[in-house]
Image: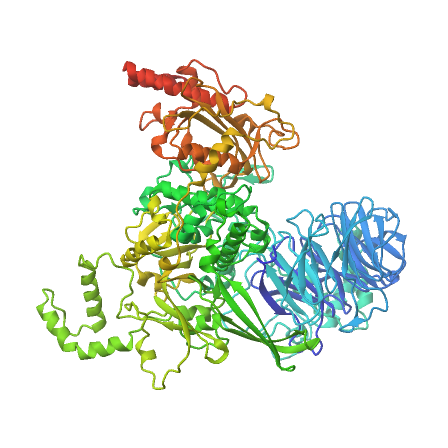
């Protein structure tokens, strides 16, 4: 919740000539306009417009501090320590009432609605009073304990905080006590927040606790009470104490805690004691003293002791109210200033001749503006009006009567302020109603005084009381207009930089598809992938991980390892990853969906705590490039931990640790104690470390800084038993087989290094100079002569293009263009020299075309001799790059389910490798695999670009190019050792499902405590039954909803748009024997216990009722989703044929890929191409003469019906009348509307 807040406005409200700062203690958002009202300690009230942060009104309400501000439709009432002041919205004084008899006023609260004048006040006196601010009269009063500090209202109840730390309750209208006073804090109560049945208080620490910044210490606990019993629910710890509290409008029990030091926390009053609120640091240089929250909950305002206002917004399009009335734009002056001539149209006796003042400064004293009416003239006018009949004034139910009765008496003998002159001098209407669109007038129908018209369908029409239209039509400046119309937050700093306006190529752009009416299984994904490699669907939440999963899939050792893994744990990422890789193998160039893997990922607490899941508070406003790097670290470590706890016979060999892990050597030097300590730890990823001072550095230097890190800080020294300045040095001690590098870009300066344009190496320039004549001779012999004056780079590009057209080099796109040297190297070498100072690890760039790892010419031409060090080195070659793509703002798409960013992956794949072939896993012995590895190393690599389910051929140059693509940001790079296939023995595929799946059929176990064998609705598989490709089973599945559908209405067309589809989970799966002597008997009838809460059982369509999936009360045969999946996979791997109705949709929701030759779908059997598909109930009624699905669905009944339809289909085909019968069936359907 807090990470999305951003600071949009910082404004100093003090006058430029003010010698002392005035604290902003009173803040309130207007409920009618996009305004924020502030009251200072000097009694100045200011209205600030959102989002321009311009002052629209500023006036002095009192000489005392402003306690509270209550803006109404036409007036603004401010309460100070001694007076209650009413001004119009332009700042003209309407009424001022002295309330000295109540003592110093320190708290005030409205009793009724926004426009009602009733309010309750309290202060240093021993009573609280209910007053009418319009009539300046006291309605009621009641005695209470002295020194009221804060008043809050909830319905008919007033909650008053006292300086003694107690909280008193009063009836809001009679002011009678409503309960016993409770002791909330040991000292003064600072603030109270009330909502529904919750009361939250904060206060000061006990007397004698000391001072901080010259003020008493605060109580570190915020207390939450139940208003019905005033019982303490729980205290919330807040470091540094709290000074302000405010409930959030959009949440039921969430409230914000503001500390004086600028810390903002959002806490839940109903949360458990172990739930600690997260903090956000507000950028302020002084102590906070005031806060306010808008009615929409999208804006927060804070005032400090220096008079500086800070405004935080939840998003870039945040607003104060949902239906604000537009403000008139400020007048446009022809020059930069204009002389004011107030009251020039009125004849003034004896005008004073003063030079005209110019209105350049908004804090210019009004008394300097001329011509100006004299004090005597206005006073005579007031006295003349006072001489009129009292009956005429009393009949006028206006506050001006009370004002005029006291006006002359109060104004005599002192200097008159400009705001106290008659209203015609400065009463300007600045707040008119929003204009009515003229196009609505012809269609306007009047009824009494109310006119109605059809809702405008044009996008350009102005819509009254519509937030989007108000934001579009009320912008007063270009900056404000851009701010209000800006799209959703792009979260990436490269999108906030507006330097580029380049269209993203189609191969990089994210393909946006509308979800088909009958589900994703009807969408044709094959048009987006013309390669042999499988794509991954990226439409589900958290699908940003699919690019890294693609990289792991194309690493043969990892792919073989996870596919051989199978354990009994319900939540196992390795098992789900193996199931996903198996689906990708079976898809053969199609598209797979990581539905079950993402479901398991959502249930892992570590992933949520690290902010890797979308929709959580910890991940909000986190850039996708940062999240994918965090997911990389999490997944590698999690896979390693799962394999460490799994027996070796079930795939427990830790291949991930073997490939990615390396050892760190960390040394700690105590600079004062002169002693050192050395320890070792392991790691799997390396972060790039950028220089603090912006300068041009190479990729090798950044990587070397990440491998060899240094840091100096003051820590506890165990040897010295005190805090010492310690220097930490870390370096890589052993080299990994796969080097995973994380870009860790945090600023535009870091990204500029990656955008360094490619350069020509020195050896290439020398060769071009020496062979310039040979090159010209070669061009003369060519059939395509070059133009005169053509640059060498252009000719080099032409030669490179022509060489690519040659059949001998057409297949090689794995080596970078030798004429260009990219900032990211294709090959590197890590060296650890033992005799070197500090034992640091070195990074050396290698030539792109060298097979022995020669250094570049700049390193070979060293003048100083290389020292004779004992060197250990490892050679690496780039195999994968994950990049972050910032999409342009989407204004045309009706779907709002896409982020403004996504990821792509460039992966180098060995030509001729078929992952679906089991032989690619290698042989049993390492020596035999080594011989095959030599042949594999000689084959060339081909680069592909993976963009979700879109896969295209690419090149190494495209993977390394960042200078031409300002919307592209590197995230993760993978370098593979060139001798990896000699060092790693890839295990043979053991088919764990076939080895362990049969036991799950023979010995079914239920998780329900009340399920017994005699209550089973199925007959388990018997030992004499053989599962073979000749076996047929009928299948049907039922699903429940675990996430509701999210929709929105297109305001232009009025149509409903699905923003997020309903998410289902498997709840029941039934299998019937469809062949053999026991055909028709249920083989399996499992109810699935999911790990996610069910939001809708869909009983009408699923037959699942509440309690069927409860382990404690259900009598059904309950199993886990993983157990049901393993049994279904066992049948599919054995070649069993499945018969059912609508199996494509069922298998997609189950997240399993079954070969097409093993599926018999009655939807396709009884279907005429180009016409609608027939429902199971319709086919059962008119083909089998059966009435099914009467009240609810039953999966066994549906599976038996599908099996009968299949055998009826075979009978009709054998009789030769199937086509005629099918046409007659459609004729019947047309006549009755295809109803059963």
Q: Position of residue 201 (x, y in %)?
A: 78, 55
Instruction: Report the coloring of the rendering.
Output: rainbow
Q: Nearer the viewer, residue 409 or 1168?
A: 1168
Q: Nearer the viewer, residue 137 or 180?
A: 180
On the rendered image, what quadrant is the N terminus found in? bottom right
Q: Position of residue 998 (x, y in %)?
A: 47, 32
Q: Position of residue 709 (x, y in %)?
A: 51, 73
- Is 126 left, or right, of 451 in this rendering? right
Instruction: Give the residue displayed 45% in from the left and 42% down from the top.
Output: 579
Residue 735 in view of the camera = yes
Instruction: Give the residue displayed 53% in from the left and 70% down from the top.
Output: 665
Residue 422 in view of the camera = no
- Is 346 left, or right, of 441 in this rendering? right
- Is 746 left, or right, of 584 in this rendering? right
Q: Is 917 situated above or below 976?
A: above
Q: Is 1009 situated above or below 509?
A: above
Q: Is 618 situated above or below 1176?
A: below
Badge count: 0
Q: Is 875 situated above or below 767?
A: above
Q: Nearer the viewer, residue 853 or 1197?
A: 853
Q: Position of residue 668 (x, y in %)?
A: 59, 75
On the rendered image, what quadrant is the C terminus found in? top left
Instruction: Give the residue displayed 31% in from the left and 82% down from the top.
Output: 861
Residue 882, quarter of picture: bottom left
């Amino acid at each position: 919740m807090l990470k999305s807040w951003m600071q949009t406005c910082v404004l100093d409200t003090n006058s430029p000539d003010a010698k002392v700062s005035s604290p902003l203690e009173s803040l309130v958002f207007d409920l009618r306009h996009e305004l924020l009202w502030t009251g200072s300690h000097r009694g100045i009230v200011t209205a600030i417009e959102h989002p321009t942060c311009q002052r629209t009104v500023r006036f002095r309400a009192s000489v005392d501090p402003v306690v509270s501000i209550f803006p109404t439709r036409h007036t603004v009432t401010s309460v100070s320590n001694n007076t209650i002041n009413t001004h119009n919205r332009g700042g003209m004084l309407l009424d001022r009432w002295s309330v000295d008899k109540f003592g110093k006023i320190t708290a005030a609260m409205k009793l009724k609605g926004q426009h009602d004048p009733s309010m309750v006040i309290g202060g240093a006196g021993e009573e609280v009073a209910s007053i009418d601010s319009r009539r300046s009269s006291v309605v009621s009063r009641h005695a209470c304990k002295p020194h009221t500090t804060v008043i809050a209202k909830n319905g008919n109840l007033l909650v008053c905080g006292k300086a003694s730390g107690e909280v008193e309750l009063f009836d809001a209208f009679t002011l009678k006590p409503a309960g016993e006073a409770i002791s909330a804090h040991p000292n003064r109560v600072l603030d109270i927040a009330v909502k529904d049945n919750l009361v939250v208080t904060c206060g000061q620490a006990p007397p004698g606790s000391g001072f901080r910044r010259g003020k008493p210490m605060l109580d570190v606990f915020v207390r939450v009470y139940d208003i019905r019993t005033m019982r303490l629910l729980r205290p919330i710890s807040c470091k540094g104490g709290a000074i302000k509290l405010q409930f959030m409008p959009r949440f039921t029990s969430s409230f914000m805690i503001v500390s004086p030091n600028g810390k903002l926390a959002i806490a839940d009053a109903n949360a458990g004691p172990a739930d600690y609120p997260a903090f956000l640091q507000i950028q302020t240089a002084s102590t906070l003293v005031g806060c306010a929250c808008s009615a929409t909950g999208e804006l927060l305002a804070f005032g400090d002791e220096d008079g500086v206002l800070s405004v935080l917004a939840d998003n870039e399009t945040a607003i104060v109210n949902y239906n604000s009335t537009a403000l008139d734009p400020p007048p446009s002056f022809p020059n930069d200033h204009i002389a004011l001539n107030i009251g020039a149209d009125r004849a003034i006796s004896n005008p004073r001749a003063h030079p005209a003042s110019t209105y350049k400064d908004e804090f210019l004293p009004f008394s300097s503006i001329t011509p100006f009416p004299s004090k005597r003239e206005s006073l005579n006018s007031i006295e003349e009006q006072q001489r009129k009949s009292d009956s005429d004034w009393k009949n006028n139910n206006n506050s001006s009567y009370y004002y005029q009765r006291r006006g002359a008496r109060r104004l005599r003998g002192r200097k008159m302020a400009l705001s106290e002159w008659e209203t015609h001098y400065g009463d300007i209407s600045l707040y008119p109603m929003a204009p009515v669109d003229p196009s609505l007038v012809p269609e306007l129908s009047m009824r009494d005084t109310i006119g109605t018209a059809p809702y405008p369908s044009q996008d350009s029409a102005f819509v009254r009381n519509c937030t989007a239209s108000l934001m579009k039509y009320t912008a007063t400046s270009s900056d404000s207009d851009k701010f209000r119309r800006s799209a959703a937050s792009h979260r990436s700093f490269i999108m906030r930089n507006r330097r580029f306006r380049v269209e993203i190529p189609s191969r990089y752009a994210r393909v946006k598809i509308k979800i088909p009416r009958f589900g994703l299984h009807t969408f044709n994904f094959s048009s987006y992938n013309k390669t042999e490699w499988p794509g991954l669907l990226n439409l589900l939440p958290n699908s940003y991980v699919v690019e890294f999963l693609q990289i792991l899939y194309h690493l043969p050792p990892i792919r073989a390892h996870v596919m051989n893994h199978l354990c009994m744990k319900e939540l196992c990422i390795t098992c789900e990853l193996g199931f996903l890789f198996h689906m990708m193998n079976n898809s053969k160039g199609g598209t797979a969906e990581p539905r079950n893997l993402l479901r398991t990922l959502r249930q892992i607490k570590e992933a949520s705590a690290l902010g890797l899941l979308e929709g959580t508070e910890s991940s909000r406003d986190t850039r996708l490039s940062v999240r994918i790097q965090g997911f990389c670290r999490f997944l590698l470590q999690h896979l390693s931990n799962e394999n460490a706890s799994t027996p070796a016979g079930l795939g427990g060999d830790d291949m991930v640790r073997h490939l990615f892990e390396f050892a760190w050597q960390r040394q700690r030097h105590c600079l004062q104690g002169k002693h050192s300590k050395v320890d070792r730890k392991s790691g799997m990823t390396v972060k790039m470390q950028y220089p603090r001072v912006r300068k041009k550095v190479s990729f090798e230097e950044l990587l070397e800084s990440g491998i060899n890190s240094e840091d100096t800080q003051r820590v506890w020294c165990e040897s010295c038993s005190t805090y010492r300045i310690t220097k930490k040095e870390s370096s890589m001690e052993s080299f990994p087989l796969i080097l995973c590098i994380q870009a860790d870009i945090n600023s535009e300066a870091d990204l500029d290094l990656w955008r360094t344009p490619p350069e020509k190496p020195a050896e290439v320039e020398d060769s071009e100079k020496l062979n310039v004549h040979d090159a010209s001779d070669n061009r003369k012999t060519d059939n395509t002569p070059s133009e005169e004056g053509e640059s060498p780079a252009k000719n080099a590009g032409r030669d490179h293009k022509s060489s690519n057209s040659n059949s001998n080099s057409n297949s090689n796109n794995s080596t970078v263009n030798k004429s260009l040297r990219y900032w990211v190297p294709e090959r590197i070498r890590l060296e650890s020299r033992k005799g070197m100072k500090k034992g640091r690890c070195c990074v050396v760039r290698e030539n792109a075309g060298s097979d022995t790892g020669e250094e570049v010419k700049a390193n070979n031409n060293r003048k100083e001799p290389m020292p004779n060090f004992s060197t250990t080195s490892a050679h690496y070659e780039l195999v994968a790059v994950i990049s972050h793509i910032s999409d342009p703002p989407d204004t045309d798409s009706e779907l709002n389910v896409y982020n403004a960013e996504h990821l792509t992956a460039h992966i180098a794949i060995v030509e001729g490798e078929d992952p679906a072939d089991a032989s690619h896993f290698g042989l049993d012995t390492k020596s035999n695999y080594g011989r095959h590895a030599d042949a594999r190393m000689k084959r060339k690599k081909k680069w592909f670009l993976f963009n979700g389910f879109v896969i295209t051929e690419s090149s190494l140059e495209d993977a390394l190019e960042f200078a031409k693509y300002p919307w592209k940001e590197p995230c993760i790079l993978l370098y593979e050792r060139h001798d990896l296939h000699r060092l790693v023995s890839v295990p043979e595929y053991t088919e764990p499902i076939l080895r362990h799946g049969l036991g799950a059929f023979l010995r079914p176990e239920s998780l329900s405590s009340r399920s017994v064998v005699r209550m089973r609705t199925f007959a388990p598989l018997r030992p004499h039954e053989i599962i073979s490709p000749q076996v047929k089973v009928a299948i049907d599945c039922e699903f429940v909803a675990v996430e509701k559908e999210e929709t929105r209405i297109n305001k232009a067309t009025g149509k409903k748009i699905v923003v997020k589809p309903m998410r289902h989970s498997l709840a029941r799966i039934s299998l019937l024997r469809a062949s053999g002597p026991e055909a028709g008997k249920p083989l399996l009838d499992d109810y699935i216990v999911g790990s996610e809460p069910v939001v809708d059982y869909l009983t009408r369509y699923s037959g699942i009722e509440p309690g069927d999936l409860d382990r404690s009360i259900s009598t059904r045969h309950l199993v886990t989703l993983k157990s049901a999946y393993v049994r279904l996979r066992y049948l599919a791997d054995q070649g069993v044929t499945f018969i059912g109705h609508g199996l494509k949709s069922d298998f997609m929701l189950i997240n399993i890929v079954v070969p097409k030759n093993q599926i018999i779908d009655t939807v396709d059997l009884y279907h005429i191409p180009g016409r609608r598909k027939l429902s199971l109930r319709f086919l059962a009624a008119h083909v089998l003469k059966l009435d099914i699905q009467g009240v609810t669905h039953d999966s066994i009944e549906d599976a038996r019906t599908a099996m009968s339809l299949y055998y009826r289909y075979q009978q009709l085909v054998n009789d030769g009348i199937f086509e005629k019968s099918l046409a007659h069936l459609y004729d019947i359907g047309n006549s009755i509307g295809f109803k059963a």
